[in-house]
Image (cartoon, rainbow, N blue to C red):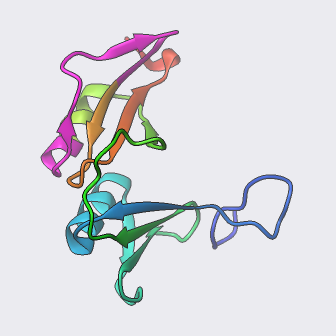
C-alpha cells in the first residue's frame, strides 16, 4: 500500500473516512490514538480533529466536536478484531473505555465485548473464530 488514505470499492477517486461525534476533541483524540495507534493532526480546523495511522496508510477517523450528548443507541460502530480479546479489552478500558458486557458474547465462533468510548460511542472488540482458545 502506498502512503495516503485508504481507498475502497471499485473507484480510485473515493476515500473512506469515518466521522465520530465527541464533546472534547483533546480527550477523544488521546483515547482513539491510544486505542488505534493513530496520530492526531493538531492543525485540524475548529471543531474537527483528524486522526490517521502513523504511517498514513489506512482509514481516517475524523473527530467532530458537537454540543449535544449521544442520547440513543449508536447505529454505526467500530469493530476492532484482535488476537487476544481479554488483553485488548483490559488495555482499552485502561485508556478510558467502559465495558457494557460483563461476559463475552459468542456467536458463530466469534467472541466479543461491547464497550463505549469516553463520549458513550459504542464499539466492539472481537476475537475471530480461528483465534479463540
10 displayed left or right of 25 = right
The number of numbered discs placed on residues in the rendered structure image is: 0
15 part of magenta stretch? no
Which span of residues is magenta-colored? 92-112
Q: Position of residue 120 (x, y in %)?
A: 25, 48
Where residue 58 sits, quadrant-wise, is bottom right
Q: Residue sitting at 27 percent across and 63 percent down?
A: 68
81 displayed left or right of 59 = left
41 displayed left or right of 11 = left
Q: With respect to residue 4, does 112 lie above or below? A: above
Q: Position of residue 55 (x, y in %)?
A: 51, 69
Viewer-proximal residue, 4 or 8?
A: 8
108 part of magenta stretch? yes
Q: Residue sitting at 24 percent across and 55 percent down?
A: 119
Q: Where is residue 132 in the image (x, y as percent from the top left)?
A: 41, 15
61 displayed left or right of 10 = left
Viewer-proximal residue, 115 or 129?
A: 115
Amino acid at each position: 500500500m502506498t502512503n495516503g488514505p485508504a481507498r475502497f470499492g471499485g473507484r480510485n477517486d473515493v476515500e473512506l473516512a469515518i466521522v465520530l461525534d465527541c464533546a472534547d476533541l483533546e480527550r477523544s483524540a488521546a483515547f482513539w490514538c491510544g486505542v488505534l495507534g493513530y496520530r492526531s493532526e493538531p492543525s485540524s480546523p475548529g471543531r474537527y480533529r483528524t486522526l490517521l495511522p502513523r504511517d498514513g496508510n489506512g482509514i481516517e477517523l475524523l473527530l467532530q466536536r458537537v454540543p449535544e450528548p449521544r442520547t440513543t443507541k449508536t447505529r454505526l460502530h467500530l469493530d476492532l478484531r484482535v488476537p487476544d480479546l481479554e488483553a485488548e479489552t483490559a488495555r482499552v478500558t485502561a485508556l478510558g473505555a467502559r465495558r457494557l458486557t460483563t461476559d463475552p458474547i459468542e456467536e458463530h465462533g466469534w467472541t466479543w465485548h461491547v464497550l463505549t468510548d469516553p463520549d458513550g460511542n459504542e464499539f466492539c472488540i472481537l476475537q475471530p473464530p480461528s483465534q479463540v482458545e
